[in-house]
Amino acid sequence: EADIYQTPRYLVIGTGKKITLECSQTMGHDKMYWYQQDPGMELHLIHYSYGVNSTEKGDLSSESTVSRIRTEHFPLTLESARPSHTSQYLCASSEWEGARGYTFGSGTRLTVV
Amino acid sequence: GEDVEQSLFLSVREGDSSVINCTYTDSSSTYLYWYKQEPGAGLQLLTYIFSNMDMKQDQRLTVLLNKKDKHLSLRIADTQTGDSAIYFCAESIDNAGNMLTFGGGTRLMVKP
């Protein structure tokens, strides 16, 4: 079954550590997105990609970086985690056109202590 | 720029109908979406409506679109405790490469 996978689901890490949040999709979607979600629910777009070797920053400034070397894989990296990075991170993908909107992963809940 | 607004919170009793409202500003929206987010999970697409439609019904869900007022609503009939979740509306702008703009989410609480 086509789907989008995020790992890990939960991560508690110390300040200053480097971390990579994984996101993979099996649907062959060209477009992929990373959102940061506040405890207050609002979604903030932090990165997106329109295909291999394409990455763009989103509306919310973020200290994270992303890469898109393969169509199915869109990892997000924090070089030095801080408590302010504590949040829920959601990955999504979509087709280039059409009505189906985004397919979301289950999210990674990151806590930096 | 585009903006999508939702009320923060709605509380209903089990068995009643729920109506979640959304307003948007960009008149060039092509598709409008409703997503559901359960605790600790990602967003799940519930339904969508094309901008030239007024209404779409899918089992207990009814979507109403008033394009003149830029108002979208989601009605859930016979609301159940399993419907308790956060509901997001989103719009797709025709000339924005299918990028979605999301509202802030409405938390629906269903009381037994």
Image (cartoon, coloured by chain):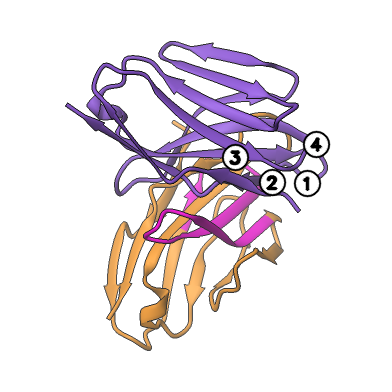
From the rendered image, report the letter of the chain displayed in purple: B
What type is the residue that disc 2 sits on?
Met
Residues under numbered marks 2 and 3 in contact, where contact means CB atoms less than 8 Å apart: no
Span shown in magenta: A23-49
N-term-proximal mark, 4 vs 1: 4
Picture quadrant of residue A70: bottom right
- Residue at image mark 4: B28
Tell whether position A31 is magenta.
yes
- Residue at image mark 1: B96
Residue A96 seen by the camera? no
Residues under numbered marks 2 and 1 in contact, where contact means CB atoms less than 8 Å apart: yes
Residues tagged by mark 4 and mark 1 found on one chain of the structure: yes
Horizontally, is B61 left or right of B93 in the view? left
Q: Nearer the viewer, residue B7 or A58?
A: B7
Horizontally, is B54 left or right of B27 in the view? left
Of circles 4 and 1, the one toward us is 4
From the rendered image, report the letter of the chain displayed in orange: A
- Residue at image mark 2: B99
Residues under numbered marks 2 and 4 in contact, where contact means CB atoms less than 8 Å apart: no
Q: Residue at x 30, y 18 (%)?
A: B16
